[in-house]
Image: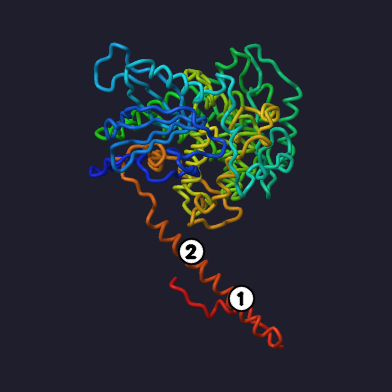
Protein backbone atom coordinates (compact mmCIF):
# COMPACT_ATOMS: atom_id res chain seq x y z
CA UNK A 1 0.00 0.00 0.00
CA UNK A 2 1.30 3.44 -0.91
CA UNK A 3 2.06 6.03 1.72
CA UNK A 4 -0.17 8.56 -0.01
CA UNK A 5 -2.58 9.82 2.57
CA UNK A 6 -5.99 11.12 1.63
CA UNK A 7 -5.66 14.60 0.05
CA UNK A 8 -6.76 17.23 2.55
CA UNK A 9 -9.79 19.38 1.82
CA UNK A 10 -10.38 22.98 2.69
CA UNK A 11 -14.14 23.02 3.08
CA UNK A 12 -14.23 26.79 3.45
CA UNK A 13 -12.74 27.39 0.01
CA UNK A 14 -14.68 26.72 -3.15
CA UNK A 15 -12.71 29.27 -5.13
CA UNK A 16 -11.53 27.70 -8.38
CA UNK A 17 -7.83 27.44 -9.13
CA UNK A 18 -8.80 29.08 -12.42
CA UNK A 19 -9.85 32.26 -10.62
CA UNK A 20 -6.98 34.65 -11.01
CA UNK A 21 -6.35 38.35 -11.37
CA UNK A 22 -3.47 38.23 -13.82
CA UNK A 23 -2.16 35.67 -16.29
CA UNK A 24 0.75 33.53 -15.07
CA UNK A 25 2.10 32.09 -18.31
CA UNK A 26 4.02 35.02 -19.74
CA UNK A 27 1.10 36.44 -21.71
CA UNK A 28 0.60 40.18 -21.93
CA UNK A 29 -2.55 42.29 -21.97
CA UNK A 30 -2.95 44.26 -25.19
CA UNK A 31 -4.48 47.68 -24.80
CA UNK A 32 -8.29 47.52 -25.08
CA UNK A 33 -8.10 43.71 -25.32
CA UNK A 34 -10.38 41.48 -23.29
CA UNK A 35 -7.93 38.56 -23.38
CA UNK A 36 -4.16 38.20 -22.97
CA UNK A 37 -2.24 37.33 -26.12
CA UNK A 38 1.23 36.12 -26.92
CA UNK A 39 3.14 37.76 -29.78
CA UNK A 40 1.85 35.98 -32.88
CA UNK A 41 -1.40 34.94 -31.20
CA UNK A 42 -4.57 36.07 -32.99
CA UNK A 43 -8.18 36.03 -31.86
CA UNK A 44 -10.46 33.84 -33.96
CA UNK A 45 -13.90 34.12 -32.36
CA UNK A 46 -15.80 34.61 -29.12
CA UNK A 47 -19.20 33.58 -27.81
CA UNK A 48 -21.38 33.83 -24.71
CA UNK A 49 -21.45 30.53 -22.84
CA UNK A 50 -22.20 28.96 -19.50
CA UNK A 51 -19.14 27.28 -18.02
CA UNK A 52 -20.42 24.28 -16.09
CA UNK A 53 -17.73 24.31 -13.41
CA UNK A 54 -17.60 21.03 -11.43
CA UNK A 55 -16.59 22.96 -8.33
CA UNK A 56 -18.49 26.27 -8.42
CA UNK A 57 -21.52 25.37 -10.54
CA UNK A 58 -22.71 27.28 -13.61
CA UNK A 59 -20.66 30.38 -14.44
CA UNK A 60 -21.87 32.78 -17.11
CA UNK A 61 -19.07 34.17 -19.24
CA UNK A 62 -17.58 34.89 -22.61
CA UNK A 63 -15.47 32.25 -24.33
CA UNK A 64 -12.66 33.44 -26.59
CA UNK A 65 -10.81 31.22 -29.04
CA UNK A 66 -7.42 32.20 -30.48
CA UNK A 67 -4.94 30.25 -32.57
CA UNK A 68 -3.27 29.24 -29.28
CA UNK A 69 -5.78 29.11 -26.45
CA UNK A 70 -9.31 28.75 -25.18
CA UNK A 71 -10.01 31.59 -22.76
CA UNK A 72 -13.09 32.13 -20.63
CA UNK A 73 -13.78 35.31 -18.68
CA UNK A 74 -16.79 35.36 -16.40
CA UNK A 75 -19.36 38.15 -16.24
CA UNK A 76 -21.63 39.17 -13.37
CA UNK A 77 -19.42 37.52 -10.75
CA UNK A 78 -16.77 38.78 -8.35
CA UNK A 79 -14.00 37.77 -8.23
CA UNK A 80 -13.73 37.22 -11.96
CA UNK A 81 -13.36 33.59 -13.05
CA UNK A 82 -10.65 33.03 -15.65
CA UNK A 83 -10.18 29.77 -17.54
CA UNK A 84 -7.04 29.70 -19.69
CA UNK A 85 -6.33 26.47 -21.63
CA UNK A 86 -3.78 26.00 -24.44
CA UNK A 87 -5.53 24.36 -27.38
CA UNK A 88 -2.69 21.84 -27.55
CA UNK A 89 -3.85 20.43 -24.21
CA UNK A 90 -7.21 19.42 -25.70
CA UNK A 91 -7.57 15.72 -26.50
CA UNK A 92 -11.22 15.52 -27.54
CA UNK A 93 -14.18 17.81 -28.30
CA UNK A 94 -17.67 16.34 -28.22
CA UNK A 95 -21.16 17.73 -28.65
CA UNK A 96 -23.32 17.49 -25.57
CA UNK A 97 -27.10 17.06 -25.86
CA UNK A 98 -29.31 17.57 -28.90
CA UNK A 99 -31.91 19.94 -30.27
CA UNK A 100 -34.59 18.34 -28.08
CA UNK A 101 -32.57 18.51 -24.85
CA UNK A 102 -34.57 20.24 -22.13
CA UNK A 103 -32.41 19.94 -19.02
CA UNK A 104 -30.64 22.99 -17.67
CA UNK A 105 -27.24 23.48 -19.32
CA UNK A 106 -27.63 20.16 -21.14
CA UNK A 107 -26.78 21.45 -24.63
CA UNK A 108 -23.22 22.42 -25.50
CA UNK A 109 -19.68 21.04 -25.66
CA UNK A 110 -17.69 18.52 -23.61
CA UNK A 111 -13.91 18.96 -23.81
CA UNK A 112 -11.45 16.35 -22.55
CA UNK A 113 -7.94 17.64 -21.82
CA UNK A 114 -4.58 15.88 -21.68
CA UNK A 115 -3.65 17.57 -18.39
CA UNK A 116 -6.09 15.72 -16.09
CA UNK A 117 -9.17 17.98 -16.46
CA UNK A 118 -12.42 18.13 -18.42
CA UNK A 119 -14.37 21.21 -19.45
CA UNK A 120 -18.08 21.60 -20.16
CA UNK A 121 -19.73 24.62 -21.80
CA UNK A 122 -23.47 25.08 -22.21
CA UNK A 123 -24.74 27.06 -25.21
CA UNK A 124 -28.02 28.48 -26.43
CA UNK A 125 -29.93 26.16 -28.73
CA UNK A 126 -30.99 28.86 -31.19
CA UNK A 127 -29.48 28.94 -34.66
CA UNK A 128 -26.15 27.22 -35.25
CA UNK A 129 -24.38 28.56 -32.16
CA UNK A 130 -22.85 25.22 -31.24
CA UNK A 131 -21.92 24.13 -34.74
CA UNK A 132 -19.86 27.25 -35.39
CA UNK A 133 -17.86 27.15 -32.16
CA UNK A 134 -17.42 23.37 -32.45
CA UNK A 135 -15.96 23.65 -35.95
CA UNK A 136 -13.64 26.53 -35.03
CA UNK A 137 -12.39 24.84 -31.87
CA UNK A 138 -11.84 21.53 -33.66
CA UNK A 139 -9.94 23.22 -36.46
CA UNK A 140 -7.52 25.10 -34.21
CA UNK A 141 -7.15 22.49 -31.47
CA UNK A 142 -6.16 19.87 -34.04
CA UNK A 143 -4.16 21.80 -36.65
CA UNK A 144 -2.39 18.71 -38.03
CA UNK A 145 -5.76 17.25 -38.97
CA UNK A 146 -6.72 20.44 -40.83
CA UNK A 147 -3.48 21.35 -42.66
CA UNK A 148 -2.73 24.19 -40.25
CA UNK A 149 0.64 24.88 -38.59
CA UNK A 150 1.32 24.35 -34.91
CA UNK A 151 1.22 27.61 -32.95
CA UNK A 152 4.95 27.11 -32.28
CA UNK A 153 5.61 28.08 -35.91
CA UNK A 154 3.82 31.44 -35.61
CA UNK A 155 4.90 32.24 -32.05
CA UNK A 156 6.82 35.54 -32.08
CA UNK A 157 7.94 35.64 -28.45
CA UNK A 158 11.43 36.86 -27.57
CA UNK A 159 13.51 35.45 -24.71
CA UNK A 160 16.82 36.42 -23.16
CA UNK A 161 18.10 32.85 -23.52
CA UNK A 162 18.20 30.65 -26.62
CA UNK A 163 17.11 27.23 -25.41
CA UNK A 164 18.24 25.51 -28.60
CA UNK A 165 21.85 26.20 -27.56
CA UNK A 166 21.49 23.98 -24.47
CA UNK A 167 22.09 20.75 -26.35
CA UNK A 168 24.83 20.06 -28.86
CA UNK A 169 24.38 16.57 -30.34
CA UNK A 170 27.98 16.41 -31.53
CA UNK A 171 29.42 17.11 -28.07
CA UNK A 172 27.21 14.38 -26.62
CA UNK A 173 27.85 11.94 -29.45
CA UNK A 174 29.79 8.77 -28.69
CA UNK A 175 28.12 5.89 -30.45
CA UNK A 176 24.61 5.50 -31.77
CA UNK A 177 23.45 3.52 -28.73
CA UNK A 178 25.76 4.71 -25.97
CA UNK A 179 24.06 6.77 -23.27
CA UNK A 180 26.65 7.18 -20.50
CA UNK A 181 30.20 6.21 -19.44
CA UNK A 182 31.18 5.90 -15.79
CA UNK A 183 34.05 8.39 -15.27
CA UNK A 184 36.02 6.03 -12.99
CA UNK A 185 35.42 2.40 -13.91
CA UNK A 186 34.55 3.08 -17.59
CA UNK A 187 31.42 0.89 -17.43
CA UNK A 188 28.82 2.04 -19.94
CA UNK A 189 25.05 2.30 -20.24
CA UNK A 190 24.00 1.18 -23.72
CA UNK A 191 20.50 1.11 -25.21
CA UNK A 192 18.83 -0.65 -28.14
CA UNK A 193 15.62 -2.29 -29.27
CA UNK A 194 14.83 -6.01 -28.95
CA UNK A 195 16.75 -8.51 -31.10
CA UNK A 196 14.76 -9.74 -34.11
CA UNK A 197 14.89 -13.41 -33.18
CA UNK A 198 11.39 -14.46 -34.23
CA UNK A 199 9.86 -17.92 -33.87
CA UNK A 200 12.62 -19.56 -35.90
CA UNK A 201 15.40 -18.30 -33.60
CA UNK A 202 17.24 -16.21 -36.18
CA UNK A 203 20.77 -15.07 -35.32
CA UNK A 204 22.92 -12.12 -36.30
CA UNK A 205 26.65 -12.66 -35.95
CA UNK A 206 27.42 -8.94 -36.13
CA UNK A 207 25.04 -8.19 -33.27
CA UNK A 208 26.45 -11.02 -31.17
CA UNK A 209 30.00 -9.82 -31.85
CA UNK A 210 29.03 -6.23 -31.03
CA UNK A 211 27.79 -7.22 -27.58
CA UNK A 212 30.99 -9.19 -27.00
CA UNK A 213 33.01 -6.06 -27.87
CA UNK A 214 31.02 -4.03 -25.31
CA UNK A 215 31.73 -6.70 -22.68
CA UNK A 216 35.43 -6.88 -23.57
CA UNK A 217 35.80 -3.10 -23.46
CA UNK A 218 34.76 -3.14 -19.81
CA UNK A 219 37.58 -5.56 -18.97
CA UNK A 220 36.25 -6.30 -15.47
CA UNK A 221 33.35 -8.66 -16.19
CA UNK A 222 32.85 -12.17 -17.53
CA UNK A 223 29.32 -11.47 -18.77
CA UNK A 224 27.50 -8.42 -20.14
CA UNK A 225 24.34 -7.59 -18.19
CA UNK A 226 21.22 -7.06 -20.32
CA UNK A 227 18.11 -5.50 -18.79
CA UNK A 228 14.93 -6.19 -20.75
CA UNK A 229 12.26 -3.79 -19.49
CA UNK A 230 9.39 -6.10 -20.44
CA UNK A 231 7.71 -8.86 -18.46
CA UNK A 232 9.20 -12.16 -19.65
CA UNK A 233 5.85 -13.38 -20.97
CA UNK A 234 5.62 -10.33 -23.23
CA UNK A 235 9.14 -10.87 -24.52
CA UNK A 236 8.26 -14.45 -25.43
CA UNK A 237 5.03 -13.31 -27.10
CA UNK A 238 6.97 -10.77 -29.19
CA UNK A 239 8.67 -13.67 -30.95
CA UNK A 240 5.42 -14.23 -32.84
CA UNK A 241 5.79 -10.77 -34.43
CA UNK A 242 9.48 -11.18 -35.28
CA UNK A 243 10.95 -9.86 -32.05
CA UNK A 244 12.20 -11.65 -28.97
CA UNK A 245 15.09 -11.61 -26.52
CA UNK A 246 18.73 -12.69 -26.15
CA UNK A 247 18.87 -16.46 -25.67
CA UNK A 248 21.76 -18.32 -24.03
CA UNK A 249 22.69 -20.15 -27.22
CA UNK A 250 23.29 -16.98 -29.24
CA UNK A 251 24.54 -14.80 -26.37
CA UNK A 252 26.49 -17.10 -24.00
CA UNK A 253 28.51 -14.16 -22.64
CA UNK A 254 25.45 -12.20 -21.50
CA UNK A 255 23.08 -12.52 -18.56
CA UNK A 256 19.49 -11.37 -19.10
CA UNK A 257 17.11 -9.86 -16.52
CA UNK A 258 13.45 -8.96 -17.11
CA UNK A 259 12.17 -5.91 -15.25
CA UNK A 260 8.41 -6.56 -15.57
CA UNK A 261 7.45 -3.06 -16.74
CA UNK A 262 4.20 -3.17 -18.68
CA UNK A 263 3.56 -1.74 -22.16
CA UNK A 264 2.11 1.57 -23.33
CA UNK A 265 -1.47 0.28 -23.37
CA UNK A 266 -1.39 -0.76 -19.71
CA UNK A 267 0.05 2.64 -18.74
CA UNK A 268 -2.63 4.50 -20.70
CA UNK A 269 -5.42 2.61 -18.94
CA UNK A 270 -3.76 3.14 -15.56
CA UNK A 271 -3.71 6.92 -16.06
CA UNK A 272 -7.37 6.88 -17.11
CA UNK A 273 -8.25 5.12 -13.86
CA UNK A 274 -6.21 7.66 -11.92
CA UNK A 275 -8.04 10.54 -13.57
CA UNK A 276 -11.37 8.93 -12.67
CA UNK A 277 -10.56 9.07 -8.95
CA UNK A 278 -9.07 12.59 -8.87
CA UNK A 279 -11.22 14.62 -11.29
CA UNK A 280 -13.55 16.28 -10.78
CA UNK A 281 -14.03 14.76 -7.31
CA UNK A 282 -11.48 12.96 -5.19
CA UNK A 283 -12.63 9.56 -4.00
CA UNK A 284 -12.05 10.44 -0.34
CA UNK A 285 -13.93 7.69 1.51
CA UNK A 286 -11.89 4.87 -0.03
CA UNK A 287 -8.86 6.85 -1.12
CA UNK A 288 -6.08 4.32 -0.55
CA UNK A 289 -7.93 1.38 -2.08
CA UNK A 290 -9.06 3.54 -5.02
CA UNK A 291 -5.50 4.72 -5.63
CA UNK A 292 -4.19 1.18 -5.37
CA UNK A 293 -6.76 -0.03 -7.92
CA UNK A 294 -5.29 2.32 -10.57
CA UNK A 295 -1.86 0.62 -10.24
CA UNK A 296 -0.25 3.96 -11.13
CA UNK A 297 2.17 4.02 -8.20
CA UNK A 298 2.89 0.35 -8.76
CA UNK A 299 4.06 1.16 -12.27
CA UNK A 300 6.13 4.07 -10.94
CA UNK A 301 7.72 1.65 -8.48
CA UNK A 302 8.66 -0.84 -11.21
CA UNK A 303 10.24 1.85 -13.40
CA UNK A 304 12.26 3.24 -10.47
CA UNK A 305 13.28 -0.25 -9.34
CA UNK A 306 14.53 -1.07 -12.83
CA UNK A 307 16.53 2.15 -13.06
CA UNK A 308 18.07 1.48 -9.62
CA UNK A 309 19.23 -1.95 -10.81
CA UNK A 310 20.82 -0.41 -13.91
CA UNK A 311 22.57 2.32 -11.92
CA UNK A 312 23.79 -0.03 -9.19
CA UNK A 313 25.15 -2.56 -11.68
CA UNK A 314 27.20 0.18 -13.39
CA UNK A 315 28.38 1.96 -10.23
CA UNK A 316 28.77 -0.77 -7.60
CA UNK A 317 28.98 -3.78 -9.90
CA UNK A 318 31.36 -1.96 -12.24
CA UNK A 319 29.67 -3.70 -15.14
CA UNK A 320 28.54 -2.37 -18.51
CA UNK A 321 24.86 -2.84 -19.20
CA UNK A 322 22.56 -2.94 -22.22
CA UNK A 323 18.97 -1.75 -21.76
CA UNK A 324 16.09 -2.37 -24.13
CA UNK A 325 12.35 -2.94 -24.31
CA UNK A 326 10.50 -3.73 -27.53
CA UNK A 327 11.32 -0.74 -29.73
CA UNK A 328 13.79 1.12 -27.53
CA UNK A 329 12.09 4.49 -27.30
CA UNK A 330 9.64 4.16 -24.35
CA UNK A 331 10.60 2.07 -21.32
CA UNK A 332 14.23 2.11 -22.47
CA UNK A 333 14.30 5.92 -22.34
CA UNK A 334 12.74 5.87 -18.87
CA UNK A 335 15.36 3.46 -17.53
CA UNK A 336 18.48 4.98 -19.08
CA UNK A 337 17.58 8.59 -18.24
CA UNK A 338 16.61 7.77 -14.64
CA UNK A 339 19.78 5.69 -14.17
CA UNK A 340 21.87 8.60 -15.48
CA UNK A 341 20.03 10.94 -13.12
CA UNK A 342 20.95 8.65 -10.21
CA UNK A 343 24.59 8.27 -11.29
CA UNK A 344 25.56 11.73 -12.54
CA UNK A 345 24.96 14.93 -10.56
CA UNK A 346 25.27 17.02 -13.74
CA UNK A 347 21.86 15.81 -14.86
CA UNK A 348 20.37 17.06 -11.59
CA UNK A 349 21.08 20.66 -12.57
CA UNK A 350 18.60 22.67 -14.62
CA UNK A 351 20.68 22.71 -17.79
CA UNK A 352 21.86 19.14 -17.23
CA UNK A 353 18.30 17.88 -17.01
CA UNK A 354 17.42 19.74 -20.20
CA UNK A 355 20.35 18.02 -21.91
CA UNK A 356 19.15 14.67 -20.54
CA UNK A 357 15.67 15.16 -22.02
CA UNK A 358 17.08 16.34 -25.34
CA UNK A 359 19.49 13.41 -25.60
CA UNK A 360 17.71 10.39 -24.14
CA UNK A 361 14.17 11.30 -25.21
CA UNK A 362 14.13 13.71 -28.14
CA UNK A 363 17.28 12.76 -30.06
CA UNK A 364 16.88 9.04 -29.43
CA UNK A 365 13.42 9.14 -30.97
CA UNK A 366 10.73 8.88 -28.32
CA UNK A 367 7.52 9.07 -30.35
CA UNK A 368 6.16 12.32 -28.90
CA UNK A 369 3.84 12.85 -31.88
CA UNK A 370 2.19 9.48 -31.36
CA UNK A 371 2.30 9.29 -27.57
CA UNK A 372 0.92 12.81 -27.04
CA UNK A 373 -1.08 13.24 -30.24
CA UNK A 374 0.01 16.82 -30.93
CA UNK A 375 -2.60 18.54 -33.10
CA UNK A 376 -4.26 15.23 -34.00
CA UNK A 377 -8.03 14.74 -33.58
CA UNK A 378 -7.75 10.95 -33.37
CA UNK A 379 -8.11 10.78 -29.59
CA UNK A 380 -8.61 7.00 -29.64
CA UNK A 381 -5.21 6.35 -31.22
CA UNK A 382 -3.79 3.23 -29.54
CA UNK A 383 -0.28 4.72 -29.70
CA UNK A 384 -1.06 7.40 -27.13
CA UNK A 385 0.48 6.77 -23.73
CA UNK A 386 1.80 8.79 -20.75
CA UNK A 387 5.36 7.42 -20.91
CA UNK A 388 7.10 10.80 -20.58
CA UNK A 389 4.69 11.89 -17.82
CA UNK A 390 5.61 8.71 -15.96
CA UNK A 391 9.30 9.57 -16.26
CA UNK A 392 8.73 13.08 -14.88
CA UNK A 393 6.70 11.58 -12.03
CA UNK A 394 9.66 9.31 -11.19
CA UNK A 395 11.94 12.37 -11.16
CA UNK A 396 9.53 14.11 -8.78
CA UNK A 397 9.56 11.06 -6.49
CA UNK A 398 13.37 11.26 -6.39
CA UNK A 399 13.31 14.98 -5.65
CA UNK A 400 11.00 14.33 -2.70
CA UNK A 401 13.42 11.79 -1.25
CA UNK A 402 16.51 13.92 -1.93
CA UNK A 403 15.30 17.52 -1.45
CA UNK A 404 18.78 19.10 -1.68
CA UNK A 405 20.14 17.05 -4.60
CA UNK A 406 18.29 18.73 -7.48
CA UNK A 407 18.86 22.28 -8.69
CA UNK A 408 15.34 22.46 -10.13
CA UNK A 409 12.07 22.58 -8.23
CA UNK A 410 8.59 21.16 -8.67
CA UNK A 411 7.47 24.09 -10.81
CA UNK A 412 10.23 23.25 -13.29
CA UNK A 413 8.79 19.75 -13.79
CA UNK A 414 5.21 21.04 -14.07
CA UNK A 415 6.26 23.66 -16.62
CA UNK A 416 7.88 20.94 -18.74
CA UNK A 417 4.68 18.87 -18.64
CA UNK A 418 2.47 21.86 -19.45
CA UNK A 419 4.51 22.63 -22.56
CA UNK A 420 4.71 18.97 -23.48
CA UNK A 421 1.09 19.53 -24.51
CA UNK A 422 0.79 23.26 -25.29
CA UNK A 423 2.49 23.33 -28.75
CA UNK A 424 3.74 26.81 -27.84
CA UNK A 425 7.31 25.63 -28.38
CA UNK A 426 8.94 23.24 -30.81
CA UNK A 427 10.85 21.17 -28.25
CA UNK A 428 8.48 18.20 -28.07
CA UNK A 429 7.02 18.33 -31.56
CA UNK A 430 7.44 15.32 -33.87
CA UNK A 431 8.99 11.92 -33.19
CA UNK A 432 12.42 11.96 -34.81
CA UNK A 433 15.27 14.29 -35.76
CA UNK A 434 14.80 13.81 -39.51
CA UNK A 435 11.29 15.29 -39.39
CA UNK A 436 12.46 18.11 -37.12
CA UNK A 437 15.21 18.94 -39.57
CA UNK A 438 12.76 18.80 -42.48
CA UNK A 439 10.42 21.19 -40.65
CA UNK A 440 13.38 23.38 -39.54
CA UNK A 441 12.13 23.28 -35.95
CA UNK A 442 15.22 24.88 -34.40
CA UNK A 443 15.07 27.73 -36.93
CA UNK A 444 11.33 28.36 -37.04
CA UNK A 445 10.25 27.72 -33.44
CA UNK A 446 11.35 28.54 -29.90
CA UNK A 447 12.55 26.05 -27.31
CA UNK A 448 10.81 25.36 -24.00
CA UNK A 449 14.23 25.84 -22.41
CA UNK A 450 14.23 29.46 -23.65
CA UNK A 451 11.29 30.20 -21.36
CA UNK A 452 12.67 28.26 -18.39
CA UNK A 453 16.25 29.53 -18.63
CA UNK A 454 15.06 33.13 -18.97
CA UNK A 455 13.17 32.72 -15.67
CA UNK A 456 15.59 30.48 -13.76
CA UNK A 457 14.74 31.91 -10.36
CA UNK A 458 11.16 30.59 -10.69
CA UNK A 459 12.43 27.09 -11.39
CA UNK A 460 15.33 26.87 -8.94
CA UNK A 461 15.30 24.78 -5.76
CA UNK A 462 16.57 27.06 -2.95
CA UNK A 463 17.71 24.03 -0.93
CA UNK A 464 19.99 22.73 -3.67
CA UNK A 465 23.48 21.71 -2.54
CA UNK A 466 25.92 20.90 -5.30
CA UNK A 467 27.60 17.52 -4.91
CA UNK A 468 29.96 15.71 -7.25
CA UNK A 469 30.18 11.98 -7.90
CA UNK A 470 27.42 11.04 -5.49
CA UNK A 471 25.06 8.31 -6.68
CA UNK A 472 21.46 8.55 -5.51
CA UNK A 473 19.42 5.43 -4.90
CA UNK A 474 15.81 6.27 -4.05
CA UNK A 475 13.69 3.89 -2.01
CA UNK A 476 11.25 2.39 -4.49
CA UNK A 477 8.90 0.66 -2.04
CA UNK A 478 5.21 1.53 -2.08
CA UNK A 479 5.51 2.92 1.45
CA UNK A 480 7.82 5.66 0.22
CA UNK A 481 6.01 6.64 -2.98
CA UNK A 482 3.37 9.36 -3.06
CA UNK A 483 0.77 10.57 -5.50
CA UNK A 484 1.94 13.88 -6.99
CA UNK A 485 -1.00 15.91 -5.71
CA UNK A 486 0.24 19.29 -6.95
CA UNK A 487 0.15 17.95 -10.49
CA UNK A 488 -2.61 15.37 -10.73
CA UNK A 489 -5.09 17.18 -8.46
CA UNK A 490 -4.04 20.78 -9.01
CA UNK A 491 -7.33 21.75 -10.72
CA UNK A 492 -9.39 20.84 -7.65
CA UNK A 493 -9.76 23.97 -5.46
CA UNK A 494 -10.84 21.90 -2.48
CA UNK A 495 -7.39 20.39 -2.11
CA UNK A 496 -5.46 22.46 0.37
CA UNK A 497 -2.50 23.79 -1.55
CA UNK A 498 0.82 24.38 0.22
CA UNK A 499 2.06 26.85 -2.39
CA UNK A 500 4.10 28.75 -1.85
CA UNK A 501 5.83 26.50 0.64
CA UNK A 502 6.39 28.70 3.73
CA UNK A 503 9.77 27.14 4.55
CA UNK A 504 10.94 27.52 0.95
CA UNK A 505 9.62 31.08 0.84
CA UNK A 506 11.49 32.05 4.03
CA UNK A 507 14.67 30.41 2.72
CA UNK A 508 14.38 32.41 -0.49
CA UNK A 509 14.05 35.59 1.57
CA UNK A 510 17.21 34.71 3.49
CA UNK A 511 19.08 34.02 0.25
CA UNK A 512 17.96 37.41 -1.09
CA UNK A 513 19.15 39.03 2.13
CA UNK A 514 22.51 37.30 1.78
CA UNK A 515 22.83 38.50 -1.81
CA UNK A 516 22.02 42.04 -0.69
CA UNK A 517 24.81 41.92 1.91
CA UNK A 518 27.23 40.58 -0.68
CA UNK A 519 26.31 43.43 -3.02
CA UNK A 520 26.87 46.00 -0.28
CA UNK A 521 30.19 44.40 0.57
CA UNK A 522 31.34 44.70 -3.02
CA UNK A 523 30.28 48.35 -3.11
CA UNK A 524 32.21 49.05 0.10
CA UNK A 525 35.27 47.32 -1.29
CA UNK A 526 35.13 49.35 -4.51
CA UNK A 527 34.74 52.58 -2.52
CA UNK A 528 37.59 51.64 -0.21
CA UNK A 529 39.87 50.70 -3.09
CA UNK A 530 39.23 54.01 -4.83
CA UNK A 531 40.11 55.96 -1.68
CA UNK A 532 43.44 54.24 -1.23
CA UNK A 533 44.29 53.74 -4.89
CA UNK A 534 47.22 56.15 -4.58
CA UNK A 535 48.36 54.65 -1.32
CA UNK A 536 51.02 51.97 -1.02
CA UNK A 537 48.81 50.11 1.43
CA UNK A 538 47.32 46.96 -0.08
CA UNK A 539 43.57 46.81 -0.12
CA UNK A 540 41.87 44.18 2.01
CA UNK A 541 40.84 40.94 0.35
CA UNK A 542 37.14 40.03 0.13
CA UNK A 543 37.66 37.19 2.60
CA UNK A 544 39.26 39.59 5.11
CA UNK A 545 36.44 42.08 4.74
CA UNK A 546 33.83 39.31 4.96
CA UNK A 547 35.10 38.38 8.43
CA UNK A 548 33.99 41.79 9.71
CA UNK A 549 30.50 41.61 8.24
CA UNK A 550 27.80 40.22 10.50
CA UNK A 551 24.41 39.10 9.25
CA UNK A 552 21.19 37.83 10.77
CA UNK A 553 22.00 34.22 9.89
Q: Quadrant of residue 58?
A: top left
- The answer to whether residue 250 is seen in the rendering is yes
* Residue drawn at the location 56% of the way across and 74% of the way down: 521
Which class describes the residues within 10 Å of circle 1: few (<14), some (14-19), or many (20+)?
few
**Which is more N-terminal, label 1 or label 2?**
2
Callout 1: SS: helix
Quadrant for the N terminus in the image: top left
* Residue drawn at the location 35% of the way across and 41% of the way down: 19
Callout 2: SS: helix
Where does residue 155 sit, x and y in percent of width and height?
Answer: 58, 36
Where does residue 383 sit, x and y in percent of width and height?
Answer: 53, 21
Give 179 or 156, whichever is nearer the viewer. 156
Q: Residue 472 bears which disc, if any?
A: none
Residue picked out by circle 1: 542
Does 377 sit above or below residue 274? above
- The answer to whether residue 421 is seen in the rendering is no
Q: Quadrant of residue 54?
A: top left
Does 295 sit above or below residue 181? above
* Residue drawn at the location 75% of the way across and 22% of the way down: 205
**Which residue lies most toward the front here?**
32
Q: On the picture, is 412 further left or further right than 106?
A: right
Between marks 2 and 1 in the image, the one whose residue lies nearer the viewer:
2
Q: Residue 512 bears which disc, if any?
A: 2
Where does residue 190 sit, x and y in percent of width and height?
Answer: 66, 35
Give 549 or 145, whichever is nearer the viewer. 145
Q: On the picture, is 70 further left or further right than 14?
A: right
Amino acid sequence: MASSSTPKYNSNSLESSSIKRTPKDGTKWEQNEEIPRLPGETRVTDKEVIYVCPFNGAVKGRLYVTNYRLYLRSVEIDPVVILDVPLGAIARIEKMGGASSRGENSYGLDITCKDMRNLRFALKQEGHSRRDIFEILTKHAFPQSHNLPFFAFVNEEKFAENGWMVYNPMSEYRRQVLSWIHPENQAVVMRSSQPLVGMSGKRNKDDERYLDIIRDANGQISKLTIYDARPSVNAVANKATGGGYEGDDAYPNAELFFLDIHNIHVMRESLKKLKDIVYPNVEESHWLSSLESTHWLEHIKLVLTGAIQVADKVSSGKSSVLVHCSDGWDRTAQLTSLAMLMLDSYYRTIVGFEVLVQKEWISFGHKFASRIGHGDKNHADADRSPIFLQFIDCVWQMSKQFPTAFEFNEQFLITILDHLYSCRFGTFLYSCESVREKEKVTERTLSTWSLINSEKAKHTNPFYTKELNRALYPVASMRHLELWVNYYIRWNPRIRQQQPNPVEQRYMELLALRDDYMRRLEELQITNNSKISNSSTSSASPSQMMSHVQTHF
